[in-house]
Amino acid sequence: MKAIVLAPVDLALAALLIVALAGLSRRMRLGIEGQLLSSAARSTIQLLLIGLVLKVLFDNAHLAWVALMAGVMIGVAGREVMVRQKLRFLGWWGFGLGSLAMFVSSFTVTVLALVLVIGSHPWYAPQYAIPLLGMILGNTMNGISLALDRLTQEALQKRQIIETRLALGQPCRQAISDSRREAIRVGLIPIINAMAAAGIVSLPGMMTGQILAGTPPVEAVKYQILVMFLIAGGTGFGTVVAVSLAARRLFDERQRLRIDRLRQPGS
């Protein structure tokens, strides 16, 4: 079955839903109509631009260009992790923690999948590498954002408890262990929920897209299962790496809790 091509008027009709929602927000004085419209415009521009970039990349497949595209994606994802934090680390750590964790997890999982599972030729073929990295990276970014935000807030809220444990002789790793476990658990909740509900509550995006494009449903399901497992692995390992590095950064070499390394709200 040939995929149905969407015309600009079709997208314009769908955009009316955003306009209507913005009008409802204004009428109810929710104050989010500006954010809705700007986010919709930003999403449209970004997707159109990435479509053009991917067209050129697919026509000129080269490892250097694919690596550059992957680096840009990881860098932007690292920035998004940083700006979503209510309490962020000062200096390079605010950006570096999320970026490093996503590189270690998402990039590694993507390369392993391309080489050992999919077996595309060449292994860095952009039509496989870029979409796969994007799906893994997006979900890993969400998990790391939630986990780091929970860890830093827990450290601030439980400051007295942690410092009491330190005063009683516990090492810093043990003193913050409860908060570290809770942060990792929170970071993994979205992907656990997504896997639990896939196929019953929701049809995941990749599977839906392949079916709409004419791929046999069973084949689309196979790819979706693969992607879900890769996302879970990338999110899990990335969250553990990010939280472990962040938990260590909260203490100095003398094992003192350093809340001053976080940017407080309003500062």
Image (cartoon, rainbow, N blue to C red):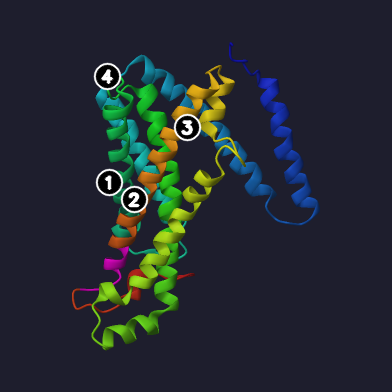
Mark 4 or mark 3: which is in front? Answer: 3
At label 4, the amino acid type is Pro
Residue assigned mark 2: 238
Residue assigned mark 1: 104
Name which residue lies at 44% across and 56% down. Answer: 187
Compare marks 4 and 3 and give the one earlier in the sequence.
4
Element on which disc 3 rests: helix
User: In whole angstroms, how far apart are the C-alphas of marks 1 and 2?
Assistant: 7 Å
Name which residue lies at 32% across and 50% down. Answer: 237
Picture mark count: 4
Q: Is residue 240 magenta?
A: no
Q: Is residue 205 above or below residue 140?
A: above
Horizontal relation, residue 15 to residue 55: left or right: right
Q: Which mark is residue 224?
A: 3
Compare marks 3 and 2 and give the one earlier in the sequence.
3
At label 1, the amino acid type is Val
Crowding at mark 4 (Cα within 10 Å: few <14, some 14-19, many 20+): few
Element on which disc 1 rests: helix
The region drawn magenta spans 246-252
Kindly give the residue lying farthest to the top in the view shown: 2
Horizontal relation, residue 59 to residue 222: left or right: left
Name which residue lies at 57% across and 28% down. Answer: 208
Q: Is residue 247 magenta?
A: yes
User: In whole angstroms, how far apart are the C-alphas of marks 4 and 3?
Assistant: 22 Å
